[in-house]
Amino acid sequence: MYQTKLHRAVSWSALTIIFLIALVVFIYPVYWLMTISLKTLIEAFRTPPSLIFIPTFRHYVRLFAQEKFLLYFLNSIIMSLGATLVALLVGVPAAYSLSRGTFRGKNALLFAILATQMAPPILFIIPYFTVYVRIKLIDTRLGMIIIYLSFTLALVIWSMRAFFDDIPGELEDAAKIDGASDFQTFARIIVPLVAAGAVAAGITSIILCWNQFVFPLILTRHRAVTATVALMKFLAAEAEDWGLMASGSIVLTLPVLFFSVLIRKFLTRGLIAGALKG
Amino acid sequence: MRRIDYLFLIPALVVLVALVALPLGQVFAQSFTNTKLLAASKQFVGFANYLKLIQDKRFWNSVTVTLLLASISLVLQVSVGLGLAIVVQKDFVLSRLGRSLFVVPIVLPPVVVAIVWRLLFSSVLPGINYFLSLVGIDGPAWFDHGWSARFAIIIAHAWYCVPYVMLMLLAGLESLPLEPVSAAYVDGANGWQIFVFITLPMLKPVLIFTTIYRAVQALKIFGLVYIMTGGGPGVSTEPMSYHIWRVGFAAYKVGYASTIAVMMFFLILVIVLGMGWYGRRTGAIR
């Protein structure tokens, strides 16, 4: 505000330098991965890395020619959608009650739901594994959807409660005066108002499921393997196949990129909602 | 309590109890047994597992590794994240672009993050070591030594988490009132004084919340280790999650693995409560 021209020029160039360094640090690795997926192996090993090269799509062709890669991709899609839909169906009404309800122990319940999410996934895997072996849910999509619910439901409840909290209570009072039942008020008045929020929570949940690694790594073998775990298997192959890993990584990232752009506005809000409420 | 609340809450509670509370309970109960994976027989052994744990060098190694990786990564995340949040908050030509570009790592699945950094630290591909050679440094074979393997994991972890921290702190910065800053300007404070004495104290609640949240995530670290180093060389990068996996699913000692898992849960709980207590004591969290 009260700065000289020189002062401003110095801080402007300092900011530019920080900006450029950060840009290289955060963008270059991703750019480099992309080039590896488009280079022949010989080209990928060349030092210094060539900036101009003839792209080849052979790694992508090889990727989709991999036995069962499409099945693993489909598994990831089915599990993410399944766990998210059930979580929304069960979680949205629960979040409404936890926002509007005036019963004792409400806050304790909310805190307990959050606290369980502190437990590391590996802790859950131990009991799930033993039970799944017994009831034959190991290496099944249904089994994976069930274990994914253990975190998607908490996510939906917490983020949807924040959206319900934003809706003024007068709306419900008005509906009640007009003779609507509690359920009608919820279904006809409130749900349409939080629909956008529910979509955002659902997409966040889909991304979270899509990214899962530890659960499918241990609880699947052949049939219910997800795309993330399949990708890791290229690494464990005899010769580490960089090209396949790079192209697989890009293909795995594209859906997340697409959905993240869709919910950009909600992303920050969801991250910060808890912080500002204290 | 309205009737509709029962109708709405009970399904969610049933699911949460069945899928979250019961498994947690089972792990706790199992930690007092010598259960083996896929074996029918198991015996109650009291506190034997816990006593064994105290003398288990490999367990303590995993605790040290977890705390080391998590704490250094946290310091990096919060300091770099805060710096970038301040840079992109400035009314500056490039800052809008920075908000979109610095968050690129967020869209990568963690598995992909691990693969990118495994490639970058590889000694055969022109990654980190190529850039080091440009400034005359002969980079090590990163995954062959304990210290450098840990360094590689910390860098990869912080790289993935910095954008989250940046976004949260940016939202925090933007919610701060402007009046105290203007008042300080009028009183003749310089930019650094304003940051240290005005902005930082006002940002403290968000800062503490962010740190707690990221700490919980950092303490759970597993995937990066699994893909980048496999816990090696030796056990130098074996954090608790990874150790539990080895004991439970490679050595089939599920009872003992449960004991370690219970300890890990309490460790996370103590750290979170400690940070929350600090926040309350300093008045940052109400």
Image: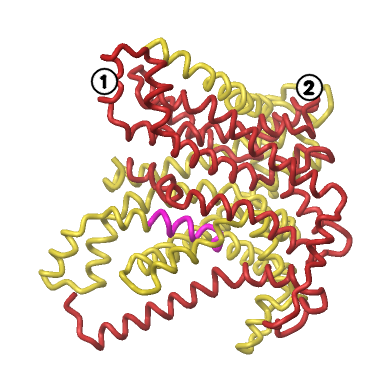
Q: Amino acid at mark 1?
A: Ala
Quarter containing the C terminus of chain A: top left
Question: Which residue, given by chain and number where applicable, does mark 2 sit on?
Answer: A135
Magenta-drawn stretch contains B161: yes
Q: Nearer the viewer, residue A235 or A84?
A: A84
Q: Residue at x 84, y 47 (%)?
A: A68
Q: Please indicate whether residue A167 sits to the left or right of residue B237 in the image.
A: left
Q: Please indicate whether residue A74 sits to the left or right of residue B38 in the image.
A: left
Quarter of the image for residue B185 reads bottom left
Q: Nearer the viewer, residue A92 or B136?
A: A92
Q: Is residue B181 visible?
A: yes
Which colour is chain A painted?
A: red
Q: Dot 1: within a 10 Å radius of its alpha carbon, few (fewer than 14), some, or many (20 or more) residues?
A: few
CA gap, disc 2 and disc 1? 50 Å
Magenta part mainly helix, strand or loop? helix
Answer above or below: position of A209 versus B7: below
Q: Position of residue A33 (x, y in %)?
A: 68, 68
Quarter of the image for residue B197 reads bottom left
Q: Residue at x 87, y 64 (%)?
A: A239
Q: Position of residue A93 (x, y in %)?
A: 46, 23
Magenta-drawn stretch contains B221: no
Q: Is residue B50 visible?
A: no
The chain identifier of the residue carrying mark 2 reads A
In the picture, one chain is yellow; tell me its letter: B
